Amino acid sequence: MSDPYLLARARALRTVPVPADRAELTRLRRAVDDVERRLVEVATPNGIQELMTSWALDVEPASGALGDSDAHRTASAVRLVTLACCIRHCWPDPSQPLYPGQPAAQEDVIASLAPLQDTLAPREGMAVLGQTAHFLTALRFLRACDYLSVDADDGTIRLGPMVALWSERDVAELRSGYDVLPAPRKG
């Protein structure tokens, strides 16, 4: 396989197994370096080490934050709050590394989100399932984007490999605002 093919494959699949062939790993590293990227090791939910491509540490990609709607699409409030709640539940100690965190019960995450229902999407007369359906939809979206690991049908939420790519500056921001993340409900 050629170097560009290895890079394209790694980017398309998001995570790839660590090549057993050292020459293939060297070619992948060379291809990644050529486009100002880096390889990051991430662990799958079953503990297998895989690789993801990320921007090099000294490269800050354009975020589109200056109003370029073609380059940047804002996440909905429900998705952002759902992700924040998952982070808080999966990262109980902000002095520890964010990724991989620890598993959290999905029902606990939803229970923490339910009181925010009126703030995010006020609707009267809805059944309990209807009140949380948009949070469940947000969880599916976050899993599809790898911010959360794929649903293992065990009722748990795990942080996904995209979280492993966040810069130290991003994680420091989360640490400084940790107390405002939606916290697990007490007893």
Image (cartoon, grey):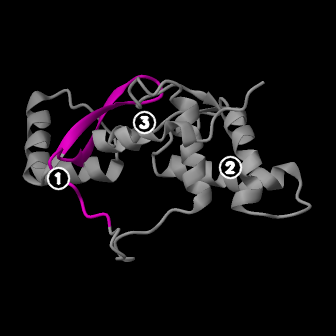
Q: Name the amino acid, label 1.
A: Val
Q: Position of residue 122 (x, y in %)?
A: 78, 63
Q: How crowded is mark 3: few (under 14 residues within 10 Å), some or many (20 or more)?
A: some
Residue 32 seen in this snapshot: yes
**Which residue matches tag 2?**
136
At horizontal 62% and vertical 41% (from top left) the residue drawn is: 182
Left or right, 28 with respect to 179, comes to left
Q: Does the magenta stretch include residue 174?
A: no
Nearer to us of marks 1 and 3 is 3
Q: Does the magenta stretch include residue 56?
A: yes
The residues bearing labels 2 and 1 have C-alpha atoms spaced at a distance of 34 Å
Q: Residues within 10 Å of mark 1 (few under 14, many from 20)?
A: few
Q: Which disc, if any, is residue 175? A: 3
Left or right, 54 with respect to 177, comes to left
At horizontal 73% and vertical 63% (from top left) the residue drawn is: 121
Q: In this picture, is 126 found above or below 147?
A: below
**Which residue matches tag 1?**
59
Nearer to us of marks 2 and 3 is 3
